[in-house]
Image (cartoon, coloured by chain):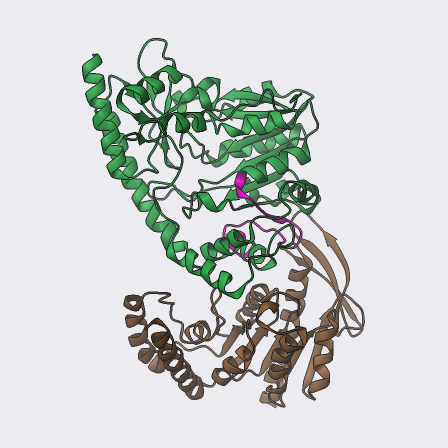
Chain colours: A green, B brown
Amino acid sequence: MFNRTKNLQLSTIKQIELRASRYPDCVSLAQGVPSFDTPNCIKRRVEKALKRGVVAKYSLSPGLPELRELIEVELAKENMFYDWQNEIIITAGTIEGITATILAITEPGDEIIIPEPTYTSYREVIALAGCKSIFVPLNEEKGWSFELGSYEKAITPKTKAIFYCNPNNPTGTLYAKKQLLGLARLAEKYNLFLISDEVYKDFIYGPGRGFFSLAEIPELRKRLIRIYGFSKAYAMTGWRIGYLHSDESIVGEILKVHDCLVTCAPVISQYAAMGALEMGESDIKKFNLIYEQRRELICSRLDRLKHIFSYVKPESSYYVFPKIKINNPDSWKFALDLLDNIQVAIVPGIAFGPNGEGHVRMSFGRNEKDITEAFNRMEGYFKKIK
Amino acid sequence: MKLLFKTILKHYLKYITKFVLFIRRPTIIVVAGSTNKPFVRDEIKRVLEAAGKSVRANPKNFNTEIGLPLAVLNLPSGYNSYKNWLPIIFKTWAKILSKNFPEFFILMLGTSDPGDIKYLLKIVKPKIAVITDITQRYLEGFSDLDELVGEYEYLVKKLPSQGLLVLNNENNRIKNLSKLTKIKTVTFGVNNKSDFSVAQITKTSQGQLATIEHGDKKKEYEINRFGLHHIYAFMIGLIIKQYVSQEEFQDSK
């Protein structure tokens, strides 16, 4: 019984959230949720669709044609060229896109290489597909960057794909173009798929920093599946809407799984996504500026706790992943101590892979008040236990 | 209050735009249809700019009662904010005197309710109309497909006698529109009964190689985009380019 699910775990982030919900006075820096509400322009677009009575029926399985057409136009602005009719699928958030992709491209027993620490749910999806996650550590000393040699060593005849999150959750690393091209060369050499989760690509900090995606390289289109979601960029986590794109030869197979899983993405959310693409640009810019200010705030508060934490300043996303500066740190115990004693919720680093142990993830998706209160409590607590 | 403001704004933009277009008299090309409008708009713009013409096209989804005038006047939208609309309304006056006015406009026309096209054609008088496709998309505002097709029939009937109609020959509903007018009509499609047809498509890593037939001529083109709709857009670009150069030749005689 339950052979497929018995080894799956509810993600650590969700376990922390459940536990935190028992404390009414809890301040949470755990959840990767923007503090903002969905922008009004998006809500208005949805109201209009509701009034016109167009949201009650299924859409075509790959999604509303007008949304896919809009996505093709948006992708072209970022130098990515995909046919909306055959190469783009609207998904119920990125995790559904990831699940459909992995189920489509793998067979049970295959291995998928994951740079870690990275997002917790990847390994559960890989396990669900009967495959094995092969973790390859990122180098913290070099700003959580790839060590390409380690990837080549991890490749076996069973390896099917390299699956990375760029910008990376939880480290906030923006992978350099040169490093990504190195991964692409490995994928070519060993005939592997590349899965690129780019859900945080809209939040990049510092002047002149651009974003590069391997999906910009046409020669990789039969190898790369790029996945994006509206949750983070447009403060739409509850709408569950995203998309994926790749060459039609791959997308045709993923579509079969997508159809089995959800038939189509929620139509009301597809209209919300249209509103986001048509009118949400200024909101993303506004969010980006606010997150940058919050990044400065959280880093300045971490600086005041130098005896407890060291950290690599995140270049993107809205997470910081500090190292706990105590002997043999157990990140799970450390996070529970903070939660039970001062009601501050953070995510233990072990949740993001073995190389995440000894760290914790803090989200600056939360507002300034929460960040300040959480750090005030932590400063008081660490003073007491000194 | 909001509805009243929208109604006043709509009429204000309509009359200012009509006035500007009456004074400046640019050549207006409209792109209508259920799909593929942005790609066709971009291709026509590319072709005309490459021929040295000054061109303006509607940005994003500026193809409705308020969006279209803004596109002509080259102004942004204030969306749902009175505060944002005020400076835009003041700027409309400067557009009357603006020196930077293009020779060509490429305007997508949107229709989601009966009468939309009729309203938009009270603002702009196109010389050339392209109809990309008619599908069930946006049908919810109409009683049936016939009523939706009626929007395009109205557009066809409003074209001037020296104008040009460009039609998708793969769609029977669109093909039949040619029967409503005596003006020059050029068709495109996959089948070889079209004036411009695709004889062969080869997908490459960089895009597509399309062999296009026109009359007794056959030529292979490299299109660095994926999907049949880009080949259609490319053919429409060829049609417009040919028509504009013929017009210039006639004018120079």
Q: Is residue A170 above or below residue A227?
A: above
Q: Is residue B139 above or below residue A188?
A: below
Q: Bounds of the magenta span?
A: A73-94
Instruction: Residue A319 in the image: state x and y as whole percent.
Output: 37, 32
Q: Quadrant of the N terminus of chain A?
A: top right
| Residue A91 counted in the magenta span | yes
Q: Which residue extends farthest top?
A: A327
Q: Is residue A17 left or right of residue A163?
A: left
- A19, B73: nearer the viewer: A19
Q: Quadrant of the C terminus of chain A?
A: top left
How many badges with numbers are in the image? 0
Instruction: Residue A186 in the image: state x and y as whole percent.
Output: 61, 28
Instruction: Residue B5 in the image: state x and y as whole percent.
Output: 34, 75
Q: Is residue A50 left or right of residue A335?
A: right
Residue B75 lies in quadrant: bottom left
Name the residue located 22 percent from the left edge and 19 percent from the top edge: A381
Name the residue located 31 percent from the left edge and 46 percent from the top edge: A289
- B245, B136: nearer the viewer: B136
Instruction: Residue B87 in the image: state x and y as whole percent.
Output: 28, 71
- A258, A209: nearer the viewer: A258
Name the residue located 47 percent from the left edge and 66 percent from the top edge: B59
Residue A191 lies in quadrant: top right
The answer to whether residue A231 is visible is no
Q: Is residue A83 above or below residue B42?
A: above
Q: Is residue A148 above or below residue A202?
A: above
Q: Is residue B54 left or right of residue B240?
A: left
| Residue B202 counted in the magenta span | no
The answer to whether residue B71 is visible is yes
